[in-house]
Image (cartoon, rainbow, N blue to C red):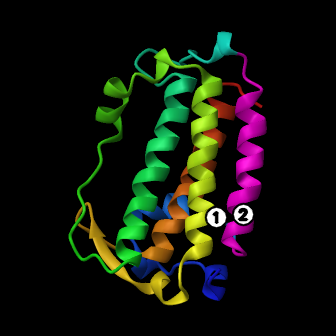
Amino acid sequence: MPASILTRPSADEYAPYYERYISRVPAGDLVTQLDAQAASFEAMFRAIPESRAGFRYATGKWSLREVVGHLIDTERVFTFRAISFARGDQNPLPSFDQDAWIPPARFDERTLHDLMNEWATVRAATIAMVRGLPENALTRRGTASGVSFTVLALLHIPPGHLTVHQELARTLYGIE
C-alpha cells in the first residue's frame, strides 16, 4: 500500500461539491477505514428483513434496495475513475446521472441479500485496488464530469458517500 494513502486530499484535488463526502472520511489509513466501514455497513443493512427492503420514506424516493444498488454503482464509477487516472489515462470521463441509472437497474427485483453480496464484492475489489496502487499514482490527475480530480481524492469519495447514506438510512429510513 502506498504510504501517502494516510494523507487526505487537499481542496484543489476535487470540486467543492465533493467536500460533503471527503470531509466525512477521517484522517488515517484509508484501507483500514474502508474495511471497518464495510463491516459497519454490512451489519446495518444485513439486519434489514427482506419484507422491509422495498421501503421508501416518501413517494418517489429510493427503496432500501435501490439505495444499496446506488452505492454499488457509485463505488464502481469512482473507483473506475481512480484506476483510469492512476494508469495515466488522460481521456475525459463522462458524468453519471445517478437518478437515470436506477430504473434500468431494476434493483427492486433482486433481494437485499443478493445486493449486499454484490456490494461486499465491489468493496473488496476497491480495497484490493487501493492496496495495489503505486504511491506515485495517488497524485495523478484526470477529468471526470468536467472536473479535475486526483486519484487520492477519488478514493476518498466512496467511503464518504457511504457514510452520508448510512446517516440517511438512520434518519429517513429508521434503520439502526
Cα distance between the residues tagged 1 and 2: 8 Å
Above or below, 82 relative to 40: below
- Nearer the observer, disc 1 or disc 2? 2
Above or below, 39 relative to 100: below
Q: Residues within 10 Å of mark 2 (few under 14, many from 20)?
A: some
Residue at mark 2: 33
Residue 58's disc is none
Q: Position of residue 176 (x, y in %)?
A: 77, 31
Above or below, 45 relative to 34: above
| Residue occupying the point 66% across, 9% down | 51
Q: What's the residue type where badge 2 is placed?
A: Gln
Would you say the magenta stretch is mainly helix, strand or loop? helix
Q: Position of residue 120 (x, y in %)?
A: 64, 44
Q: Position of residue 102 (x, y in %)?
A: 37, 29
Q: Is residue 4 visible?
A: yes
| Residue occupying the point 46% across, 24% down | 107
Location of residue 65 by image quarter: top right
Residue at mark 1: 25
Q: Quadrant of the N terminus?
A: bottom right
Q: Position of residue 114 (x, y in %)?
A: 60, 27
Q: Is residue 23 visible?
A: no
Secondary structure under tag 2 reads: helix
Secondary structure under tag 1 reads: loop
| Residue occupying the point 50% across, 42% down | 72
Mark 1 and mark 2 residues within 8 Å of each other at the beta carbon: yes
Residue 40 is covered by the magenta coloring? yes
- Left or right: where does residue 115 sit relative to residue 49? left
Q: What's the residue type where badge 1 is placed?
A: Val
Q: Magenta stretch: give its range.
A: 27-49
Residue 102 is covered by the magenta coloring? no
